[in-house]
Image: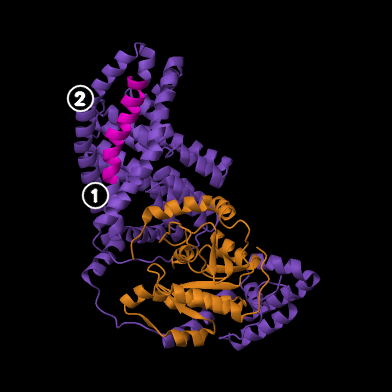
Chain colours: A purple, B orange
Amino acid sequence: MSSFAPEHPLPFQYDAALEETLTDLTSLLSDSYRLTRRAVALLLLQEDPEILAMVREVEGERFAVIEERLKAARARTDQPLDVAISLQRHTTVRAVTERVVSHPPQTRPSPTEYLGRLCMSPLTGIPILMLVLWFGLYQFVGIFGGGTLVGLLEERLFGEIINPWMTARVESLIPWRWLSDLFVGEYGIWTLGITYAVALVFPIVGTFFLAFSVLEDTGYFPRLAMLIDRLFKRIGLNGKAVIPIVLGFGCDTMATIVTRILETRRERIIATFLLSLAIPCSAQIGLMTALLAGHPRAFMVWVGIMAGIFLIIGWLTAKLLPGEAARFTMEIPPLRLPSLSNIAVKTLARMQWYFLEVLPLFVIASIVIWIGQLTGLFDLVIRMLTPVVHLLGLPDKASEAFLFGFFRRDYGAAGLERIKEQLNVNQLLVSVVTLTIFLPCVAQFLMMKKERGMKMALMMAGFIFPFALIVGIVLNQLLKILPIKL
Amino acid sequence: MTRIPFFDIVRDAMRGAKRTQTDAVESKAGEAEETPRRRVMIVGNPNVGKSVLFNRLTGHYMVVSNYPGTTVEVARGRMRLGETLYEVVDTPGMYSLRPLSEEERVGRALILNEAADAVLHVADAKNLERMLPFTLQLIEAGLPVILVVNMMDEAERIGVKIDMEALQDAVGVPVVGTAVLSGRGLEELRNAIDEFIRSRTPAAVSV
């Protein structure tokens, strides 16, 4: 096992006391480690549990002596040994870098650097974030993508031209109503699946991904992560958790995988939980925004409620989590003007990714609903959901959207889009908030199961769905009692 | 290059999960008879270009993330230098030999359990002061370290100058300056690995 690892002539030394301890410890260790005895001794002094276990196993009876020496060494210093060791390493390194590295003289920050800093400081960063949300998300994705483009595509192109023609053709080809419904019925593969995907999801998700790529290319996101990191620290959460959380705005399912970078199981559980509860993914943000487009106050209330839930749940879980800040550093690239080719490539790649994932699902959903309708199961489930939907102050028709929402939040949002005209703004807000709190999608649940185990995934889902409904019901009551008309 | 492939990190994590299987298939198809006789391990902080270096050395395509801490799984590939076939191992990001996260534990487990003929410590030239403590630990641990000072182009752009010879004298291991994204210094690094391994007593590798 120890075929190499000659004792290198070291380019540096620790202080006399530490060197003495090291000499003592190395003389007690056997020569059967992949690392040098000196490195093993240092790791022992730093109380590395794995190394302790390894040495205990390798040294057998002699471990008692080693343990005793370690205890004595720890008692001799007033500074924790791991701190002392890393400080001394740092001193050595600084002596080297001072000789070897030369830095440019400090210059005044350039305007872009200054702007970059403004994005990160909470005082200015939060208003900037609001502006980005307002113009990038609400105006561009919601009003332009969800309003103008969807109007053109869904209502004009599909609603008035393609679908009537398609329906007529299919119905003349297939004389049986029950079968033609599979393709062009209310929930048909063409009239629901393809129409949703192409006419509804495409313009909204497309504009969202475009806005997202522009922001990404300017270098805004690392700054946003820094800003959220600072807020995280305020509420006492580990800063590293910001990475999966910010990623969740792209895709919760994949962000759940990224929670692996967190240090403890507990942190991973909290991050997974927050992701599935309060972070809408890219497609969902787009569609939810599109639903609320034209109702700026409702949009702001939605953003506010989601931020509130996130902070409260984050704070509560942080209370349960002993607060230990992890080392967290992030390279912040300079702000710059986005490049057109970069944006085009990224936007197209994302749309392709989303489409490949979503189109088959929409088609499958159409088929499942068709079977459900033939067997009467669909109506049964809808009838079961209706009382719940009534509690939310919504009309019967909304049950379908919520049924869809169990599978994917964005699918549910697309379902709401269909009945948008029948809802007032309050109802729209209640349904959007409730849906946002739902689990993101079936894939998310499967990933939770894979990463956190079936029990944990079920517990989280068991909390999230009732919680979503309760928030919706409370919101509905509040709007009624106060009474607020958005 | 300073763009942040925000989505790439996500895709990367996904690919990471699948990578092991792909590798197994590829190695079966590609180099059926030959097993690598040497091993090179790439270590270093997150976000310093380990995965790009891995791709450049092995020619094995993989999407590279620019976010800290995302090389969650271990990537393995192959590289040929002269007549020798190497296994190249890309380890998860590590800040020190004393692991604090699951990823770091994986990284150290690799160092502990798999003998390497060369350990490439990839460091960010812009931030040597933060990188070198880990180099010291690797040297201290008796590992066959080559220090790869990466992102030289970015460092130069912001006016950071590094005296490579003086650095090599100070740390006592080979030092190579690179900018792996643009391919700069790669040839020099390959030569350095080759020379380094020749100069050392052969290690028994069991792949």
- Residue A94 rendering spot, x and y as whole percentages: 46, 83
- Residue A190, can we see it? yes
- Toward the viewer: A370 or A438? A370
Q: In this rendering, would A64 be left or right of A121? A: right
Which of the two discs, 2 and 1, labels the residue nearer the N terminus? 1
Q: In this rendering, would A440 be left or right of A338? A: right
Give me the disc on residue A117.
none
The structure residue drawn at horizontal position 36% and vertical position 61%, both measured from the top left corner, is: A226
Single out the residue that lies furthest toward the right: A61
Q: Amino acid at mark 1?
A: Gly
Q: What residue sits right under mark 2 in the picture?
A: A160
Q: Chain of mark 2?
A: A
Give the answer, above or below, for where B55 lies relative to A62.
Answer: above
Q: Is residue A188 magenta?
A: yes
Q: In this rendering, would B81 be left or right of A331? A: right
Q: What residue sits right under mark 1 in the picture?
A: A136
Instruction: Give the magenta-colored segment's residue range.
Output: A183-208
Q: Secondary structure at mark 1?
A: helix
Contact, mark 2 vs mark 1 (Cβ under 8 Å):
no
- Classify the position of the N terminus of chain A by image quarter: bottom right
Instruction: Tell me which secondary structure the magenta stretch mostly adopts.
Output: helix
- Residue A311 rendering spot, x and y as whole percentages: 39, 50
Q: Quadrant of residue A357?
A: top left
Q: CA distance from mark 2 to mark 1?
A: 30 Å
Q: Is residue A68 magenta?
A: no
